[in-house]
Every structure is written in structure tokens, then in C-alpha cells.
Image: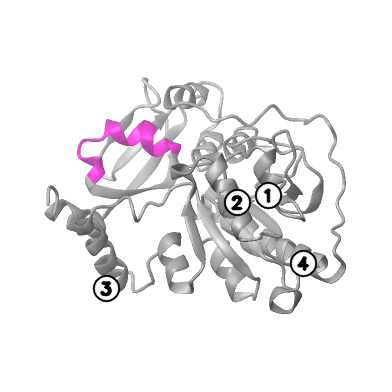
């Protein structure tokens, strides 16, 4: 067992979700010695935009900056941006931290020369009840299939995608139209973080972590990512009920890329999926139209409305565009 900091494991995080799991782990006392993320949105901004971001979060949101690179600097935790590193360089960075355990959340697939470095291996947080919905787009296919049980799995990484031994799982029943971002927050906060903290404590206390093999085959096809064209083609306006369509649109944020370009000057506002109303509408379906109530997506059984809000952040950015 490692002896640093009263036998606390040296944990390194690789994530694509910013501070989402890092902050609560730090607050819980987990010994995080390094954090890395796929790409650093904050450092990629110009100086003017960084300045505006600081003003926006301090004066408008009245919250700390949400960026992991900024948080790591404040907490004096080693940080790196994975997209700017080769696998060889990332390996050296990980070895230099003497990591006991690597934890992944919304992270890219890693080769064995990286995920096998820590003495206790690498754990991944996957947002499905494995072996169901293996792959990088589980929410879309969960909603697409009207599967109303949302789940999350803490599992070991191995040579294949999402097939490693399962450490723990949690789940709850979805409500129709529950936004996937809210579902993800619940799964992480209520299930994944307690499971991960318990796993780390078990390793610190015993040097072992109980896990179970997954079935070799998944009952669902690989949860692949899809293009915007495929996304629109998969939305079955002819055979789906209005409720089914409304539910699937909440599976991720891809509806924004598909439908908002149909609305003039949509980029100046913040948009959300809103309510639906049942009424008979004429073709073509899948188009965005507007009336006195607002903009809506057309379906044979009715309309799915989009709510539009003034964006302080976008207004400030437009003022300084080109600076």
C-alpha cells in the first residue's frame, strides 16, 4: 500500500466533464494528485474573452469559474490537457505523479500502456447499466428505445470498449422527457460518486477491490455517435407519437445543431426545449415554424415548443466581437 498522506491513494482523473466529479471528490477528502481533461476550453480563449468570462461568472452568475484548469490551479493540483499530448507524453506525466489509480469520466479510449500504469488499474464511470449501451452515445439510444431505466456503472477498463469488470451500479426510473443532462447529474451525484469513494476507501483499507465479470455480449447494439443528418433521419415523425419525439429530443443537445439553424439569428439567444401541445398539423413535419406563442417543431400530432431567452453572456460577447 502507498504510504503518502496517511496511506491515501494517489488518484489521477481524466475527464471531459470539467469540474463535475473533481470538485466533490476533493471536498470529500480523496487525495487527487493530478487532473487532466480532453481539452481546456478556458485556455483556448483569447485574453479578451477570458476577461469577459471572469466578469460574467463573478458579476452575473456569482459563482467561481467553471473551468477545470482554473480550479486545478487554485487547488494546486497538477493539470494537463490531453488533446495536446501524445500517448507517450501522457504516460510520462502519469508516471511522474506515481498514480495508484486512474479514474475516467467522459474520457477518450486509452491504450493499455496508459490504463495499466497505476498499480490498481483504471476505473471508468459509464452512464448506462452495462453491458447495455456500450459506447460513447448511450443516452440517445436509451431514449430512442424508450428504455425508462437510467443507470450508471463503475467498472475497470480493459482492452475492449466498456467490457471491463463491474465494481458497482446504480439506476432509477426515468420520467418521460427528463433532460439527459439532469439525469446525468443525478446518476453522478447520487450513485457514481458514492460508489467511487467507497471503492477508493476499500482499496486503501484492503488493497483489493471486488468486481464481477460482465456478460460477453450486450443486449443492445453499440451506442455509436451519429451525424446531424443521421439524427434527423432517425427521428420518426411518421410512426412515433408526439410524446416519444419529445422524449428523444431530450436525450442530448444534438437537437440544437439540427433545428436551431432553421431559425434566423438563433445564435443570439439561449434556447431550451419546452412543452408540447396536441393539434393536427399539416406537412412538412420536422420543420420549425412560429406563431404568436413562439417557435415550434412540427409533428403530425402537434407542436413541440422551444423557449427563447435573452443571453447576457452572448450579448457581452457580441459587444466585444472582433476585439
Colouring scheme, one of rainbow, by chain, secondary structure, one colour: one colour
Going from N to C along the chain, the mark reached first, 4 or 2, is 2
Pointer 2: what residue? 105
Going from N to C along the chain, the mark reached first, 1 or 4, is 1
Instruction: Give me the C-alpha separation between circle 1 and circle 4.
Output: 14 Å
Pointer 3: what residue? 59
Residues at badges 4 and 2 in contact (C-beta under 8 Å)?
Answer: no
Q: Which mark is residue 294?
A: none
Q: What crowding class fits label 2: few (fewer than 14 Cα within 10 Å), some (14-19), or many (20 or more)?
A: many
Q: Look at 78% across and 30% down and name the residue there.
A: 219
Q: Look at 38% across and 42% down and name the residue there.
A: 305
Residues at badges 1 and 2 in contact (C-beta under 8 Å)?
Answer: yes
**Relative to 231, residue 88 above or below:** below
In this view of the protein, which residue sits in the foreground, 46 or 113? 113
Which circle, 3 or 4, is nearer the viewer? 4
Q: Which residues are magenta?
A: 254-267
In the rendered image, residue 99, in percent from the top left (x then y), is placed at 66, 59
Pointer 4: what residue? 198
In the rendered image, residue 203, in percent from the top left (x then y), is placed at 81, 64
Q: Is residue 259 magenta?
A: yes
Q: Look at 48% across and 44% down and name the residue there.
A: 85
In this view of the protein, which residue sits in the foreground, 244 or 136? 136
Which circle, 3 or 1, is nearer the viewer? 1
Q: Secondary structure at mark 1?
A: strand
Instruction: Give me the C-alpha separation between circle 3 and circle 1.
Output: 36 Å
Which secondary structure class fits the magenta region best?
helix
In the rendered image, residue 161, in percent from the top left (x then y), is placed at 69, 35
Pointer 1: what residue? 124
Instruction: Give me the C-alpha separation between circle 4 and circle 2.
Output: 17 Å
Amino acid at each position: 500500500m502507498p504510504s503518502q498522506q496517511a496511506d491515501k491513494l494517489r488518484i489521477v482523473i481524466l475527464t471531459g466533464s470539467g469540474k463535475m466529479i473533481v470538485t466533490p471528490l476533493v471536498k470529500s477528502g480523496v487525495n487527487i494528485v493530478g487532473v487532466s481533461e480532453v481539452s481546456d476550453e478556458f485556455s483556448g480563449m483569447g485574453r479578451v474573452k477570458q476577461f469577459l468570462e471572469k466578469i460574467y461568472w463573478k458579476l452575473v452568475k456569482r459563482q467561481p469559474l467553471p473551468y477545470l484548469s482554473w480550479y486545478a490551479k487554485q487547488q494546486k493540483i497538477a493539470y494537463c490537457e490531453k488533446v495536446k499530448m501524445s500517448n507517450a507524453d501522457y504516460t510520462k506525466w502519469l508516471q511522474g505523479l506515481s498514480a495508484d489509480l486512474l479514474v475516467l469520466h467522459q474520457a477518450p479510449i486509452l491504450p493499455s500502456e496508459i490504463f495499466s500504469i497505476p498499480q490498481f488499474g483504471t476505473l471508468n464511470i459509464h452512464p448506462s447499466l452495462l453491458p447495455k449501451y456500450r459506447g460513447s452515445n448511450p443516452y440517445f439510444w436509451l431514449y430512442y428505445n424508450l428504455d425508462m431505466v437510467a443507470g450508471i456503472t463503475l467498472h475497470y477498463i480493459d482492452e475492449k470498449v466498456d467490457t471491463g469488470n463491474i465494481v458497482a451500479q446504480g439506476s432509477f426510473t426515468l420520467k418521460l422527457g427528463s433532460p439527459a443532462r439532469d439525469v446525468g447529474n443525478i446518476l453522478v451525484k447520487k450513485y457514481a460518486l458514492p460508489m467511487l469513494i467507497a471503492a477508493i476507501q476499500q482499496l486503501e483499507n484492503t488493497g483489493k477491490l471486488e468486481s464481477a465479470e460482465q456478460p460477453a455480449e450486450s443486449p443492445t447494439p453499440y451506442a455509436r455517435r451519429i451525424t446531424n443528418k443521421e439524427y434527423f433521419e432517425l427521428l420518426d415523425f411518421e410512426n412515433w407519437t408526439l410524446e416519444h419525439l419529445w422524449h428523444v429530443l431530450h436525450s442530448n443537445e444534438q437537437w440544437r445543431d439540427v433545428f436551431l439553424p432553421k431559425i434566423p439569428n438563433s445564435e443570439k439567444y439561449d434556447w431550451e426545449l419546452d412543452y408540447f401541445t396536441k393539434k393536427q398539423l399539416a406537412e412538412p413535419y420536422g420543420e420549425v415554424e412560429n406563431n404568436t406563442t413562439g417557435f415550434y417543431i412540427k409533428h403530425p400530432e402537434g407542436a413541440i415548443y422551444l423557449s427563447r431567452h435573452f443571453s447576457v453572456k452572448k450579448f457581452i460577447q457580441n459587444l466585444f466581437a472582433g476585439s
